[in-house]
Image (tube, coloured by chain):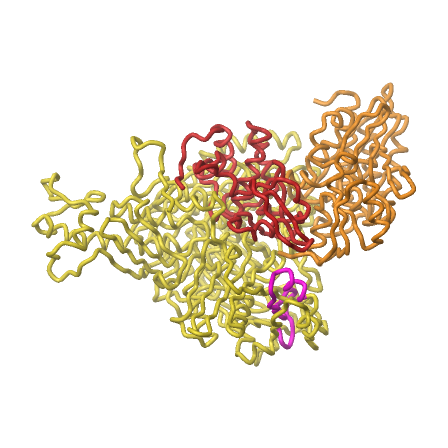
Amino acid sequence: MEVTININGQQVSRDVEPRTLLVHFIRETPGLTGTHWGCDTSNCGACVVTMDGKAVKSCTMLAAMAAGHEIRTVESLEKNGQLDPVQQGFHEKHALQCGFCTPGMLMTARALLDENPNPTEAEIRTAISGGICRCTGYKNIVAAIQWAAEHPAGERQEVQA
Amino acid sequence: MQTPASFEYERATSVDGAIASLARLGPEARVIAGGHSLLPMMKLRLAQPEHLIDINDLESELAYIRDEGGEIAIGALTRHVDLLGSDLLARHFPIFRDAEEVIADPVVRNRGTIGGSLCQADAAEDLSAVCTAVKAKVVIRGQNGSRTVPMEEFHVGPYVTAVGDSELLTEIRLPLFPGAGSAHEKVERRAGDWAIAAASAALWIDSSTISQAGIALSAVGLTTIHLTRAEELLRGKPPSEGLFEQAGQIASEDCSPNADGRGPVDYKRHLAGVLTKRALTRAAQRALKEEA
Amino acid sequence: MTIIENLPSPQTERPIGFGRLKRKEDARFIRGKGNYLDDIRLPGMVYGAMLRSPYAHAKIVSIDTSRALAHPGVAAVVTAKDLETLGLAWMPTISYDTQAVLAGDKVRFQGQEVAFVIATDEYTANDATALIDVEYEPLPAVVNARKALDPDAPLIRDDKAGQRDNLASPTWEAGDEESTDKAFAEADTIVSRDIIYPRCHPAPLETCGMIADFNPETGQLDIYNGNQAPHAHRTVYAHVAGLAEHMIRIRTGDIGGGFGNKVPVYPGYVCAIAGSIVAGVPVKWVENRSENLMSTGFARDYVMRAEMCSKDGKVTGLRVDVIADHGAFDSTAQPTKFPAGFFHIVCGSYDLEASYVKVKAVYTNKAPGGVAYRCSFRITEAVYLVERMVDALALEMKTDPIELRMKSFIKPEQFPYETTTGWTYDSGNYAETMKVAMDIAGYEELRREQAEKRARGELMGIGVSFFTEGVGAGPRKHMDILGLAMNDGADLRVHPSGKAVVSISAQTQGQGHETTFAQIVAEELGIPPEDVQVRHGDTDRSPYGLGTYGSRSTPVSGAAVAVVSRKVRDKARQIAATMLETRAEDLAWEKGRWYVKGDPEKGVLIEEIAQYAYSGDTMPEGMEGGLDAQVIYDPPNLTYPYGAYIAVVDVDPDTAQVKVRRFIAVDDCGVRINPMVVEGQIHGGLAEGIGIALMELISFDEEGNCLNSSFMDYLIPTALECPDFELGDTETPCPHHPLGAKGVGESPNVGSPPAIVNAVIDALHETHGVDHIDMPCTPARVWAAMQGRPEPPQ
């Protein structure tokens, strides 16, 4: 069946089986391998993207279910060469090591701050509790999200494209 | 990643349309809403429906939380995140917020629905006990109209509900009576995990006496355990620690847990008792507006 | 491509060399532009999927692949019979055993590989595995290590000639039995415990996989594989598959976590390679999470019995007897002469009079492995044992656990210290580190709080652990894996513009090598880190080395980079002398510049020297042009980082849930190249330690069914289970490492589980009489302990 999904502002159409999972649909779109997968049971959060602004686990959705909705992936965070504050925060605060959970964490963080611009530490930990990180022990991820909350417009571009 | 077997897919455009499709396609067709129970099972190939009917577009018909006078009506497609955030619900039934805070994780809660949770009928699922405790009734629609079923008759067995083959759960109705207080207490091995045991309690207190009680347990039986014996004990009595201790004792006797990775039988019975007492204590405090 | 600037303004001082430099590799990861194995698509690529055994132990009666072969999109179905013709049905393991690539006669653990499907896409390959019909004749299984040596236990390795029982290796010993007996005879206090370090799993977020791409025209085999030891793998493939080693190239790309899980050679890799060789197209195989948990290298599974004694308030002797559960095939990874890894370190940080240690390994019907998950070659097991025993002794002696440790520590003046198991620790000031931890924790205040809470019926525990570990294997005289010496190389080239490329053999899986190794060059040569490109992950373009695990990166590869930078610096000195028309010995160095002693204005920058090296007409006598050097570093010894950890836990008296409220970790890993990176490593390891102590477990029922084969049942801590870690540091340089650094990657996993378990027991000892509990301390198990029945996991 033909499935058309708005991904990062672009209409992406492909002929896929009904059973094609959203995470695979995204990953097979050129340039969009930033969304990862790490488990079989919706526990790890490596696949988190946003749908209509809310964080969702793309491994637990059919691509067909996302048709007609707006999906945003990690690749959409940087705009016109300007990194999103969550991306800058993760870099500032050393909130990533192997980088595998990072896209899911970034999208979760972005969705959190869009809804709650000044979260407490407890609210941050709860918000990211649907994702697993094996490398960082979460302390720096929390600090990174706090940094992003404190620098909403992004203070300076740390990384040049 | 593990991937599901093949199936046909259609999107329902109305509730009646979804029901008609179920009737047309037969028992190998299943409705999918949030999909966070069904899709993982399909990926592990524990479920292999031949047809999926996606009802996510039916939010205007099926997603709401409304005060309808003597009852609160909740549409079956209401997402966990909205149940968590509803001040209306929290005002009358704080037990929902208690439970939602510990159901799965925040990302899953953006998609999962109350209807999906209730229809999954997993004994460890929290909302089934919550709805049983608050004396909910559920509305089931078929091709010949709707019928109402009390929550304690909704779960027929493990993973089996009163919803028939060509029927859809559309609504959960919560009766509003004065003097209500409710609470949910859960113990899990880690945030987001299924309950090792959980207790839901609702009390209606009138002139310092418990006029009505609802107590149900998750994860300590083949389905939700409805503690009718404990409810009888409580009715007509003033709330007290000793009374709730007795109710807890009944809870640990009247449940039938299985030993599994979450714990052995004796520990689960013990938890049933402890959590029942805790839930009743908090429910009473809320009913009496004494909670700190 | 991307330029990283490190600080907000040019006016602020920027570290050139050691310091809290933000990471260069972040640029691609925060944009979702990492290049992990499953991101790679090659033209014509096909997909593999593995059919695995549902039984822990069964004869294979027949395998019928016809329905699978008939399925549209299926290109091939490979079984043991097919691999036999290529001589690949069995493969050697790192422990000199053999492991079935695909099961032929029998399956020996649940999840064992039985057949390999190759199809056009992943979904079809998965579908096709369900169409392979295998007839099994189930056999009784043994999954309990103690029972594996019962006379009536089923024989697992009947494929090995002369194997009559489930003993995987003869007993290994260390220490001295006689002097240990004497120490116990003279002791005033003796305690004994049965202590299990249960089976757990490194479970990196990215599972294992490989793309094998064999070009039949050229004979080149290109492998893409998240792999912690790519050069060693290349040599193994050449040897095992009879391929030409110079025609094999392994590229690792970005790796989503290793933790030892990506060290072994897995059957899926061999099948992908075989598939590509036969089909002549790229074959991609990526395992799912269940496969990862059920079949790849697990960690620990040590069943230990120990006794410890003390005299006059000081620990004096230790006896340990271990049964090591290696699973169905012995595929543990450790240096050849160390079959029990570095378990010798079980004598801990204490000045013992004597110790005697025995380890024997058994086969069981479980997945193979054992050495993984930041274990430093069994040091996690050893430290867990000794730190639990010291606490057990403290309980018996009714003395404070820190006080007993302080009295028993090896003293600074005793270094270099030879242990009773024959090792030489390099340097340490243990008491100082312990005091820093106590200060950060507010130890006295915590004990007061504990007493107050106990009076109110609240259960709070304070647990301590102090560890010394040995990392950075190792000297080629003593340490090889499969005969390959555990040395690592570095290759540094400075370009005419003064920018540099350093190629290293270490293989990062998140440790930050692209930044930290550039910092080493920067520290030694004064070339800014952003001007140093670190190259790794390609066996064609990096020097030979044994890979990254056992915290080797800094001690071995880091040393190599320091040494090679100094070689370049020395060459630069000679060239500078020529440029300045003076003698080399008249020059002095400041970071980035050689100048004339006594005339500092007169000097040349490293960039100027580089340019001259390529273009100057006169080179120093006998010296070739260019500015580069190569080194293979042979470490003279292991390095011995250490640390003091304190855990504060609260136990719910009714539900028995354990919450880690605080965790204080003071590490001494010598000189820290990038403290920010070191701290990040420690945070991650502490979280893993919480997981191991409280919730992670790979367990089996009596039939050998694995009960924890998904992330629903293999529980990993989330942000809600981890406290805000409190770190401290002391710095006692390593005397033999060029930078004085020791390495730290595994220390947090080594030190944290005993601290947490000691804390749980501390919470429950006075009120409930608990004096031991095995991990994981789940609510059910803690509750059982509170009722007086601590049950070991199985």
In-front residue for pair A5/C21: A5
Residue B139 in magenta stretch: no
At which x and y percent is residue C529? 32, 45
**Left or right: where B16 falls relative to A69:** right
At which x and y percent is residue C229? 44, 61
Q: Look at chain C in the picture and name its colour.
A: yellow
Residue C222 vs B195, above or below: the answer is below
Q: Look at chain B in the picture and name its colour.
A: orange
Residue C117 in magenta stretch: yes
Chain identifier of the red chain:
A
Q: Residue at x 74, y 27 (%)?
A: B90
At which x and y percent is residue C146? 63, 64
Q: Is residue C304 visible?
A: no
Q: Quadrant of residue C9?
A: top left
At which x and y percent is residue C312? 46, 47
In-front residue for pair C161/C263: C263
Q: Residue at x 71, y 58 (%)?
A: B6
Label tally: 0
Q: Quadrant of residue C155?
A: bottom right
The residue stretch that appears in magenta = C103-129
Residue reaching furthest right? B144
Please state, as top left, top right, bottom left or bottom right, where the C terminus of chain B lies in the image. top right
